[in-house]
Amino acid sequence: MEALAKGEVDYSLEVLASTAAHLRDGLSRGLAVSSLQRHPLFPDIPTLDEIGLTGFEVTTWNILCAPRGLPPEIAERLSRAAVAALAEAQTAERLTQAGVDPAKPTTPAETRAFLAAEVAKFRGIVQQAGLTLGR
């Protein structure tokens, strides 16, 4: 972001949370967001879909993880505590102002399904591009 603000690079693809302050202060200009909806913090920045790159959606997310084999009752207790914290209006507002979308919390089972879908989506993209991991 510093190189972008100094004009050392022409553009950058960044997570909104790391660019929000630069956008607010006018140090950088948002060209598009990679979600399918405009971000409420910057409603004037169009989506990539709106500017012609249809079907492109890459979003960031945060997931609370625990070691494999954690007893289900402890995982459930941690999940409930996280849901309660995210339900607080002050927490949601602070996240939003930082450029983070305080999405609806999910259950551990919903989180596993989400991760499986993300892996499948990106596996297809990697295979279509003919990319392989180097060693």
Image (cartoon, grey):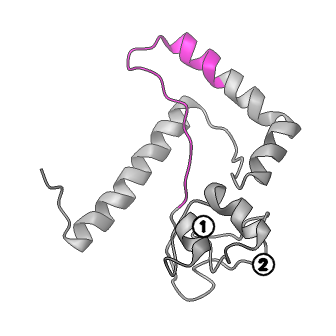
Name the front one of labels 1 and 2.
2
Q: Identify the amino acid type marked 1.
A: Ser
Residue name at image x 51 percent, y 84 percent:
53
Q: Nearer the viewer, residue 86 or 6?
A: 6
Residue 61 in the magenta stretch? The answer is yes
Q: Quadrant of residue 132?
A: bottom left
The spot of residue 3 in percent (x, y) is 53, 69
In the rendered structure, find residue 44 and report the number of the disc placed on it: 2
Q: Which residues are magenta?
A: 59-79
Report x, y in % for residue 31: 63, 80
Where 68 falls versus 56 (above or below)? above
As drawn, is 119 to the left or to the right of 94? left
48 inside magenta stretch: no
Q: Main secondary structure of the magenta part?
A: loop
Badge 1 crowding class, 10 Å Cα cut-off, few under 14, some 14 to 19, many 20 or more, is some
Secondary structure of the residue carrying numbered label 2:
loop
The residue depicted at 70 percent of the width and 72 percent of the height is: 27
Locate the N terminus and report the quarter of the image it occupies.
bottom right
To which residue does mark 1 refer? 35
Using the rendered image of the protein, determine whether residue 1 is visible from the camera's viewpoint.
no
Image-based side of 89 in relation to 30, left or right: right
Q: How many C-alpha atoms fall within 10 Å of the one at disc 2: few (<14), some, or many (≥20)?
A: few
Residue at the image point whose x is 67% and y is 74% from the top: 28
